[in-house]
Amino acid sequence: MLDLKLRNARIRTVDDLRPRARTLGVFAGRVVGLDDAVEDLPARTTLDCSGAVVVPGFGDAHNHMAWFGQSLGELDLAGAATLDQVYDAVARRAAGLPAGAWIVGSGYDDTVMGAHPHRHGLDRAAGGRPVWLKHRSGHMCAVSSEVLRMAGVLDGSAREPDGGVVVRDPGGAPTGLLQERAQSLVSALVMPYPVAELAEAISRASAVYAAEGLTHVVEAGIGLGLIGRSPVEAVAYQIARERGGLRTRVELMVAADNMHALRAHTDDAITTGLDLGLRTGFGDDRLRLGPMKIWLDGSLIGRTAAVSEPFCGHDHAAGVYQDNPDDMRRLIVAAHRAGWRVAAHAIGDSAVDLALDAFAEAQRAAPRADVRHRVEHSGVVRPDQLDRYAELGVVPVPQARFLHAVGDTMAQALGPDRTPWMYRHRSFLERGIRVPGSSDRPVAPGAPLLGMQSMVERLSNTGVVLAPDERVTAEQALRAYTLDAAWASHDEARRGSISPGKCADFVLLSDDPVEVDSDRIGAIEVIATFVDGACVHGADAIAAGTTTTLPPARSHP
C-alpha cells in the first residue's frame, strides 16, 4: 500500500525521460511511480489535486537562514524611502524601551534614501541608546555614537580590522557607517547569540521557506566570520531539527574563519580544516556540512566589489578584498586538499579571477574529479571568464532577484559597457554550465517563484530590462530552482526531479510557472509543500488517512 497518492494533478517532473504525469505514488518517503504504475494501487492517503500543478521541491543554493529568522524580530527598514523615516522608526521603537536597551534594525538601503543614517541622527532618535542598523546587503551597517563608544572607536582604542572601513567625514570624525569587516566591531559587542535564540530564528525562517515551496536550502556561512552568529552555530540547527522546527533540508556552509591548522599524517596532505577532519558531506540528507565559504570581496551596492576597472563616478574605487589575496588563494587550495568543496564569494570580476585561479591551482596540486567548486554571486563576469568556468567545472551562483531589488543601483555602478556582464544566466547555459537558483535572502526577497520571474524578465523595479541577452525561458528558470539547485549540491541522483526512486520532495501550485505570463509567475500560490512525502506546509487542507479533494485549480488557457 502506498503512503500517499496524488491523482488528477498536472505534474511537471523536470525529468527529461518523462516530463509530464497526472498521478504520483509515494512510499517510505520516495517516489515509487507515476501514472499507470501506481494508478490502481491503494493508498493510506489519497489527494485529488483537482488540476493543481505539481513540481519538484524548490531549492535555494545561497541563503542566510539564521540571519533572516532573526531579522523577522528586528526593526524592518526595507520600506524606508527617506532618512527621516528611518529616524522616526527608531524613535518609535526607542519609546517602548528602557534606557540602554539596544535597537536593532535591518534592510535599509542608502541608494533609495540618498544617504546612510548618520550617528548623530540616530543619537537624537534613540535618546542615546545603542542603535545598530544593518544594510540590506549585509556588507555594511550604521550605528549610533553609543555603539562607537562601546566599540572603542570614539576614543581611538579600537583597531580597524583588515578588510574593513570605519567611514569618516572630511574632518576625520566617524559617521557611524561601518563597511565590510569593520562590522565586527559591533558584532563583538553582541555575539555570540545563544543557540536557543538561534534555533528559534531558524525555525521561524524554516516555516516561511516551507510556505514558499522550499524543500532544500544552503546556509551560506555559519560560525565565525562576516555573518556568523556563534562559533557553535551548527548546534542551533541541530536543536531546531530535534524540536521539529526544521521543515527543510539544510546544507551548512562553514565560514573559512573557522578553519585552523591541523596535524594529520603527511600522506593525507590535510594541513587546514575543522577538528576531527570534518568536511563537506558530513551529516545526513536532512542536515549536513556543505562547502567551505570564503569571502573574497565586498558588494556592488556598496561599491566594495573587487573590479578590474573603477566604478562609475569613483575614479579610484575598484573595490576591496576581504584579506590579502595570496592568503585567500592559499586557503582555498588548503581547503580543497582537505576534501572541501569551496564556495568563494566573488562579485567583482577581479575577485572572480582570483577564485578561478585558485580553483585551477587547487586542481593542479590535488586533482579531484567533479568537485563542483562554486563562485557565489558571480556578479560581474567578463566574456573571457565564461569559458574558464566551463573548463574548470565551476558552478556560478548568481541571484536573479537582485536585478529587481537593486538592479538600477548596480547598473549605475558598472555603467552601460559592463551592465551586460551583470548576474549572467543564459551565457552560462550556452556553455553547458548549470546555474542553481538562489536568493541571498534576506539581502533580496527569497520566494523561489519571484526568483524565477526575475530570471525570465530581468526587470529592475523601475521597469528597465537589465542585460536582456541573459534572459532565460520559464522552463529553464524552473530547472534552476529544482534539478540544477540539487546538482550544485551533488544531490541530483536523490532529488530535484519527480522521478521514481528519488525523495518525495514536491510542491503543489495553483498554476503552472512555465505556462503563465511571466509577470504572473511570482504571484502563483503555493498550496502545499512536501518533504519525504510528508506535508510541511498546507497540511490543514489535507487530511491524513483519507481521500481529500482540493478545490479546482486555475487552468492556464
Image: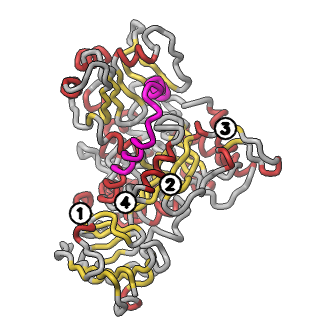
Give x and y (percent) for residue 109.
30, 32
Residue at (38% x, 19% y) in the render: 147
Q: Between tags 4 and 3, which lies in front? A: 3
Q: Which mark is residue 260?
A: 3
For residue 460, what is the image quadrant? top left
Separation of residues labelled 4 and 3 (CA atoms): 33 Å
Q: Does residue 44 show up magenta in the picture?
A: no
Mark closer to the chain start, 1 or 2: 2
Q: Are marks 2 and 4 in contact (CB under 8 Å)?
A: no
Which residue is situated farthest in the bottom direction here?
A: 40
Q: Determine whether, in the image, residue 175 is placed left or right of residue 253.
A: left
Sequence-wise first label, 3 or 2: 2
- Say what amino acid the circle numbered 4 marks: Leu
**Secondary structure mainly formed by the magenta segment:** helix
Report if residue 194 lies within the magenta region. Answer: yes
Q: CA distance from mark 1 to mark 3?
A: 46 Å
Q: Which mark is residue 309?
A: none
Using the numbered discs, state the Cα–Cα distance from disc 4 to disc 1 in whole angstroms: 13 Å
Identify the secondary structure beneath mark 3.
strand
Residue indicated by mark 1: 525
The quadrant in which the C terminus is found is bottom left
Residue named by callout 2: 251
- Lower sequence index among marks 2 and 4: 4
Secondary element under disc 1, as helix, strand or loop, is loop
Q: Which residues are magenta?
A: 180-204
Q: What residue does disc 4 label?
A: 214
Query: How far from the left and from the top, in percent, is residue 531?
Result: 40, 67
